[in-house]
Image: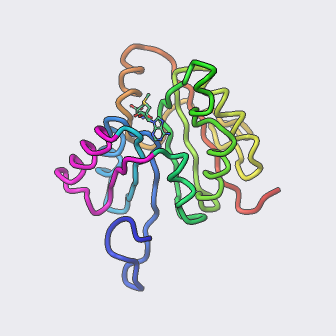
Amino acid sequence: MQVLGAPPSPDRPASELELEIGPGRGGFLYERLAQGPEIRIVGLEIRLKWASLVDQRLRELGFAERGRVFAEDIRFALPRFAPASVSRVFVHFPDPWWKKRHAKRRLASGDVASELARLLRPGGELFVQTDVWDTAEAYRLAIEAQPAFAPFGDEPGCPLLEENPYGARSPRERRVIASGLPVVRLRYRRLDTLP
Ligand SMILES: C[S@@+](CC[C@H](N)C(=O)[O-])C[C@H]1O[C@@H](n2cnc3c(N)ncnc32)[C@H](O)[C@@H]1O
């Protein structure tokens, strides 16, 4: 499926596709797309209202060829992506789902992590950030259960990053930084071959 822009041709090689999970009000998408014409990004947002508003805003900003948001639950949408079709996945401040009965809705599950391993290309990046320590730990455990991912943080062998290296911030990230709370940032790289 050609999601964004004209199909690739010998004169126009396919640029990389990025994916944001749960973009909410969309700040990260706008800032990321403003970085340059080579950026193409798709957001999957479960709330129809926000998905529609942000998709409309992308059109108004002139990014429609390179940026879209679809109203989708990632648990059903991720399996429809082709293998190795995405270069980066961003998960900014996912809902923590405190209640036990909501555990199934949590995105930090083995099913989601294995789908992300499948759709990321070798060398692709998975970035997760949150201000909730338990959420960070749940993601760390789910991702590290997948042999396809290696930590890609500031220090070798560790997924922790001090700063967001992507030059764009999500709305929640801005609020958390303004309130002075710490942010836990994790990054992993999709291995070329499985160990
Ligand atoms: C706490 S908000 C954070 C919004 C934004 N990422 C930010 O950092 O400002 C979590 C977002 O994930 C979305 N979300 C939750 N579960 C989802 C799912 N299964 N599929 C797609 N989006 C989901 C929510 O609707 C919400 O917009």
Residue 39 picture quarter: bottom left
The residue lying furthest to the left in this view is 60
Residue drawn at (46%, 63%), measured in percent from left and top? Answer: 16
Counting from the top left corner in percent of width and height, residue 166 is at 45, 43
Examine the image and state in which quarter residue 82 appears.
bottom right
Report whether 70 appears left or right of 153. Answer: left
- Region rendered in magenta: 48-72
Nearer the observer, 65 or 100: 100
Is 101 one of the magenta-colored residues? Answer: no
Residue 160 location, x and y as percent? Answer: 63, 32
Q: Is residue 63 magenta?
A: yes
Q: Answer with the quadrant where ligand 1 appears in the image.
A: top left
Q: Which one is nearer the viewer's eye here, 169 or 113?
A: 113
Measured from the top left, where is residue 113 in percent x and y? 65, 45
Residue at the (53%, 50%) spot, across then down: 76
Residue 17 rendering spot, x and y as whole percentages = 45, 60
- Examine the rendered structure and indicate whether residue 11 appears above or below residue 85: below
Q: How is the image coloured?
A: rainbow
The quadrant of the image that shows the N terminus is bottom left
Look at 47% across and 43% down and name the residue there. 21
